[in-house]
Image (cartoon, rainbow, N blue to C red):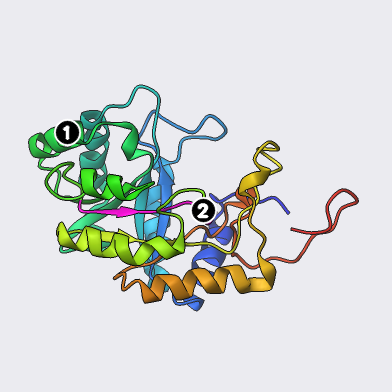
């Protein structure tokens, strides 16, 4: 049934599930103070609680930067600087090369040159990973042109974007590596967002009793990627969740 991700017992249960599955890092959607998703409360106040819970089970945590209306590259990097100051010293905050890791959702909607200029000015001390839809985004945003340290694919529907298509991953890993960066392929168990986007049936991907997920993992491993992300742990409305659950049956839907 429904639950709150702010509930202490739920947090402990979720993080314990992740560690049992040998997951090393939980990537948490985040808005800075004063900003929030249109459908939920502010989340910044939860981060210290989440870091403490992660430390108790041997898990690390980093932030997924959500876009907010009117953002600029410079403003979002101010958010990053705030998070580094506020959370970066915590033992459970995930770091690469000593720098706090952030994934920047929809980063491609802002020009690479703007990100680069803002990063040069900010000296934020972060390891910043851009969302890539295609090879051009790796070329434009990773390394010198955009100032990002890597790119990730995020989306769970094979074929939805070039970067979400497993057959592209090996080439994207090589492309990012040549620029001194990472490409992080995101594996998914399937995709089904019809309950929130009933017009999006073309992008639904069945789970195939686990075969879809297996193929994604095989492709990610064969790509040579240093890191692999999972989309997602509990994004139920897009049908990508892998958290422990029992199938539910309703008259209008045979199961999720």
Tag shown at residue 171: none
Q: Position of residue 6 (x, y in %)?
A: 53, 49
Image: magenta residue range: 149-159
Main SS of residues in magenta: loop
Q: Quadrant of the C terminus?
A: bottom right
Quarter location, residue 168: bottom left
Left or right: 198 as drawn, with respect to 81: right
Left or right: 62 as drawn, with respect to 75: right
Asked if 49 appears above or below 121 in the picture, the reply is: below
Q: Which residue is mark 2?
A: 159
Q: Which residue is mark 1?
A: 113
Q: Earlier in the sequence, mark 2 or mark 1?
A: 1
Q: Nearer the viewer, residue 104 or 175?
A: 175
Asked if 192 appears above or below 248 in the picture, the reply is: above
The 10 Å Cα crowd at callout 1, few under 14, some 14 to 19, many 20 or more, is some
Q: Nearer the viewer, residue 46 or 111?
A: 111
Left or right: 192 as drawn, with respect to 219: right
The structure residue drawn at horizontal position 26% and vertical position 55%, both measured from the top left corner, is 101
Q: Is residue 64 visible?
A: yes
Q: Nearer the viewer, residue 135 or 3?
A: 135
Is residue 152 located in the magenta-colored stretch of the structure? yes
Q: Secondary structure at mark 1?
A: helix
Q: Position of residue 107 (x, y in %)?
A: 32, 39
């Amino acid at each position: 049934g429904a639950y709150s991700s702010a509930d202490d017992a739920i947090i402990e249960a979720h993080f314990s599930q992740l560690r049992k599955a040998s997951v090393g890092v939980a990537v948490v959607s985040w808005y800075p103070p004063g900003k929030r998703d249109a459908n939920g409360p502010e989340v910044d106040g939860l981060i210290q609680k989440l870091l403490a819970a992660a430390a108790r089970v041997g898990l690390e945590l980093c932030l997924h930067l959500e876009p907010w209306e009117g953002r600029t590259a410079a403003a979002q990097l101010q958010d990053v600087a705030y998070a580094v100051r506020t959370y970066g010293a915590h033992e459970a905050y995930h770091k690469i090369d000593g720098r706090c890791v952030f994934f920047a959702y929809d980063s491609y909607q802002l020009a690479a040159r703007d990100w680069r200029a803002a990063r040069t000015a900010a000296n934020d001390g972060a390891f910043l990973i851009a969302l890539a839809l295609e090879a051009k985004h790796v070329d434009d945003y990773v390394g010198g042109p955009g100032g990002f340290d890597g790119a990730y694919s995020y989306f769970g529907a094979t074929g939805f974007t070039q970067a979400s298509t497993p057959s592209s991953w090996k080439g994207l890993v090589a492309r990012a590596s040549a620029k001194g960066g990472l490409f992080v392929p995101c594996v998914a168990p399937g995709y089904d967002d019809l309950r929130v986007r009933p017009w999006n049936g073309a992008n639904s991907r069945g789970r195939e009793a686990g075969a879809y997920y297996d193929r994604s993992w095989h492709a990610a491993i064969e790509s040579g990627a240093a890191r692999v992300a999972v989309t997602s742990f509990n994004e139920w409305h897009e049908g990508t969740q892998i958290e422990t659950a029992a199938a539910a049956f309703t008259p209008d839907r045979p199961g999720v």
